[in-house]
Amino acid sequence: MSAVKEAKLVKNLLDEKAIERIPTRDGYGEGLVEAGKRDPNVVVLCADLSDSTRSLMFQKVFPERFIETGIAEQNMMGLAAGLALAGKVPFLSTYAVFCPGINWSQLRVCVCQNDANVKLTGAHAGISVGPDGMSHQGLEDIAITRCLPGLVVLAPCDSVETKKATLAAAKYKGPIYLRFAREKTPVFTTDGTPFKIGQAEVFWTSPKPQVTIVACGPLVYEALLAAEKLEDKGLGAEVINCHTIKPLDTKTILKSVKKTGAVVTVEEHQIIGGLGSAVAELLGESCPVPMRRIGVRDRWGESGEPEELLEVFKLKSKNIVQAAEEVVKAK
Amino acid sequence: MSHYSLKELDQIANQVRQDIVEMLVTAGSGHSAGPLGMADVFTALYFGGVLNHDPKRPNWPDRDRVVLCNGHICPVLYATLARAGYFPVSELKTLRKFGSRLQGHPHRGSLPGIENSSGPVAHSSSVAVGLAYAAKMDKKKWQVYCLVGDGEQQEGQTWEAVMFAGKHHLDNLTFIMDRNNIQIDGYTEDVMPLEPLKEKYEAFRWCVIEVDGHNIEAIIDAINEAKAIFEKPVMIIAHTIPGKGIDFMEWQYSWHGKVPKPEEARKALRELRTLKGKIRSEDE
């Protein structure tokens, strides 16, 4: 088992049946309450989705700092900018398809061009949103946020990391976008796992790694499962938890790629514009090597059970294994 | 109470109009009708003794906030701020030039006195509402004034912001609308009719005051009246003539996004400096 010791991952890491599963949105809710306790300026805005975004947890403890905007996401973004300009630390809570989906222009001008200290969060990101179908499955949010100068983009890998990311976002001075998911996903990091905005963490290093797997979000777990399967087949791998898509930790990624010479990226997002594209940009300019992107292949999602959809859309460890083998062969 | 007499305020507004014409002809691009139409409102706001501000301390925490939502009319904001002492008047001629602090649309942080970056209309109405809400949360006394256009009332976001302000009784918030009846493609009532505007705002739980946008005394009275209204945000609808002050521009919607050429500017400045031929100007 080549899990990196310093990453301090859970003991039963690869036991899919036994591993604890908690929705990343719960980590957000807990993080909000903790952030609210640490800083009286933290306020939370919600667009009629307080329960499913877990911002309700904050409302229960700090009702006077919870701002219900109703179904008005453009206004919500502008309000947050105004609150931030007056010294507050606003967190926006709604689904990724609504924010930044609906209020991208307000994000661009009111928040980013004002350099306003606003933390927008995109709940229900990914295909695993499930039965709601394509309109609600946020698969483009990383693409439309990382193109904005000055905006930090985070995609934490589990509930524990989401809480850390929320707290880090509250402390950070500047606009941040944070995406998380709907479903219960494996909790594989611990309180001891390092988390720093802009610093990717190597979670797995085989003795002779042949491929670098750069992943973000809950699919980092699938990447770890893939790394184990690859080792069984005699192929070593390194797995990088790239929770910060912008600013991309080019140093950590390139250090690994110079060792392995092949890359697979993994994200619950379109293959256009997300983590895969960010890594491709880096490799193209600094270290061109064979590369494959695991993600949704430029098509819409659809209704289904989350696990079902991940299988059908080829976002499982077996798909990562296949991509890794292809890319190593292409070396 | 203003330090200036009404006569002096009219002179300041006239000077602001001259600054606008000079800025625009030098820049070679920008918007004429809106800035000229709003010169009296801006003069009333910044010189009429109604705004709690200090040009020497643009970041004074307890200052009133002025948000320009229809950012394209920034020439009138820039000219007013310069005349009020926020930055040198000589800087006005750098409008829209590379490296200038006077960006084509206001950019926060570039220039003292600019509270907010704007450009796409209606966006900043929400920012103004957010500022007002923050002040209420912290029990601060500073007021928020938000200048808006009439064309932008067509944007849905405007009504989201208005609805929120009405719900929360933001009586520290005053919007002032440049009701000049024009937009790019023509008259507002032809492009996408806005009336009845007063009733719309009242339905959203605002108080509405209508005022002649070129009567500085009446504008000052309206702002003071707005300050005295509790429990509701206030919309001051300032009825203006687009391009006011220059006879070949007044009422022409084509001057919304156009700037005078040098000969047109000379004519315009002569008109302003001689008060339409009533007095001698040193230029002649």
Image (tube, coloured by chain):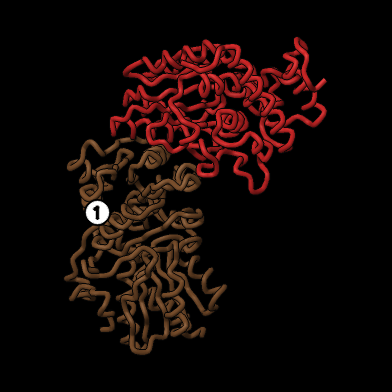
Residue A14 vs residue A78: left or right? Answer: left
* Residue A29 appears in the picture as rendered: no
* Residue B277 appears in the picture as rendered: yes
Residue A26 vs residue A178: left or right? Answer: left
Q: Residues within 10 Å of mark 1 (few under 14, many from 20)?
A: many
> Who's the residue at 47% across and 13% down the image?
B222
Tag 1's secondary structure? helix
Residue B40, position as x, y percentages in the image: 59, 19
In the depicted view, which residue is nearer to us: B163 or A112? A112
Say which chain is red. Answer: B
Residue B107, position as x, y percentages in the image: 54, 42
Which amino acid type is marked by label 1? Gly
Residue A203, position as x, y percentages in the image: 31, 75
Where, by quadrant of the figure, is residue A240 drawn? bottom left
Q: Give the chain letter at badge 1.
A: A
Where, by quadrant of the figure, is residue A70 drawn? top left
In the depicted view, which residue is nearer to us: A155 or B147? B147
For residue B42, above or below residue A7: above
For residue B125, above or below residue A331: above
Q: Which residue is mark 1?
A: A31
Q: Colour of chain A?
A: brown
> Who's the residue at 27% across and 62% down the image?
A161
For residue B177, above or below residue A51: above
In the depicted view, which residue is nearer to us: A324 or B97? B97
> Who's the residue at 44% across and 74% down the image?
A251
In the depicted view, which residue is nearer to us: B181 or B104? B104
Residue B271, position as x, y percentages in the image: 76, 18
